[in-house]
Image (cartoon, rainbow, N blue to C red):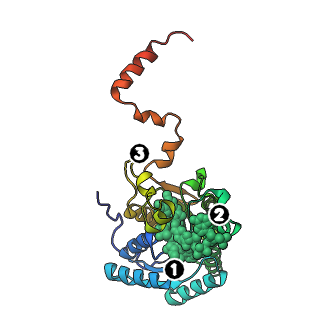
Amino acid sequence: MQHTGMFKENAFAGKTAIITGGGTGLGKAMAKYLMELGAKVVITSRKMDVLEKTSKELEAETGGVCFPIACDVREHLQITQMVDTAIQKFGQIDILINNAAGNFISPTERLSARAFGVIIDIVLKGTVNCTMELAKHWINNKQTKAKVLNIVTTYAETGSAFVVPSATAKAGVLAMTRSLAVEWAKYNIWFNAIAPGPFPTKGAWDRLLPGEMAKKFDLGARNPLKRVGDHQELANLAAYLVSDFSDYVNGECVTIDGGEWLQGAGQFNLLNQIDSSQWDMIEQIVKNVKGS
Ligand code: HXC
Ligand code: NAP
């Protein structure tokens, strides 16, 4: 089934969004949808060639405005320059989507201190630094509304083996989301998060399901809905959470994973494997149990 956009045309007219990691994958999908809805979008990441290509492609596809700015979210000075440039260009920034991330699978005992640190620096410190830089600007300028959306993962809540730096960093981002939703509501800054399940992107699949692993661990086949996510489905949710329609949603983390993480959690969920004739037998056995 092809998923379509859910908003009215021009629902984001007059709004400007910064999307970190906006040149590829889910960041690009969110950029495209916000542009289709009339928002001006700044996309940032380390690779200017990728950003420029995406920017041209999205402008041609949507007729909207997409402005690329190179910025490594590990470098505070680069963030300051990126935010200054975006404000100079568009006057006001209304939305920040912290989407940039680094991740790879590895047994944790194989990680060097630098390998652990690089993920914390991109995911946790990068999100903190981009948020702080823009929020100080919003607070100093008494902006009447700003929305921050942080892209985490389902394992920010549950933890996960073999992606421990990412799980640790995303859990920190989630804690920040919930904390600042309360502390900075008085400054008219909203904070929400999305926890996506599997949405195939080159960046994630090359590092998390390399080689034969994508076939061997088919994430669609083991999902309760028997499929992976469609980028437009995530873009719809993101658009809702940064729109005026979600003004009473603050400090929330919305899971979008087809029920994947709950499947692993429910005590008896594995009984899905039992067929109808087996259930007939089990029912008789259980009904025949008498006494204690
Ligand atoms: C062990 C590794 C490693 C690996 C890198 N390192 N890859 N260690 N196993 N597979 C170590 C290196 O040896 C080095 O440590 C340190 O990590 C830094 O590596 P660099 O290559 O120098 O880092 P850098 O060039 O900055 O690249 C950052 C990166 C890279 C995170 C390592 O993967 C990247 O650029 N990723 C960006 C995009 C991305 O990850 N997208 C996926 C997001 S998906 P030493 O000690 O040797 O110097 C996601 C959730 C998906 O987040 C959930 C799916 C369901
Ligand atoms: P992706 O295409 O690899 O996106 C990651 C982006 O982050 C890239 O555009 C990358 O661009 C940028 N980035 C990495 N390091 C950076 C740095 N130091 N400074 C600035 N930008 C940096 O992967 P994706 O799947 O779309 O992931 C997007 C978000 O969704 C991430 O937060 C990820 O954790 C989350 N997520 C994805 C899935 C999934 O199934 N795909 C599931 C759960 C959560 P450059 O290389 O140009 O810097």
Q: Residues within 10 Å of mark 1 (few under 14, many from 20)?
A: many
In the image, is the residue at mark 1 within 8 Å of ligand 2 by its beta carbon? yes
The single residue placed furthest to the bottom in the displayed view is: 88
Res. 176 mark: 2
Rate crowding at label 3 as few (under 14), some (14 to 19) or many (20 or more) other CA atoms within 10 Å. some
Rendered view: 119 above or below 261: below
Residue 233, above or below 35: above
* Residue type, label 3: Pro
Q: Residue furthest right?
A: 113
Amino acid marked by disc 2: Met
Q: Position of residue 229 (x, y in %)?
A: 40, 57
Q: Which residue corresponds to mark 3?
A: 224
Quadrant of the rendered image holding ligand 1: bottom right
Residue closer to the observer: 26 or 164: 164
C-alpha separation, residue under disc 1 versus residue under disc 3:
35 Å
**Who's the residue at 55% across and 86% down the image?**
87
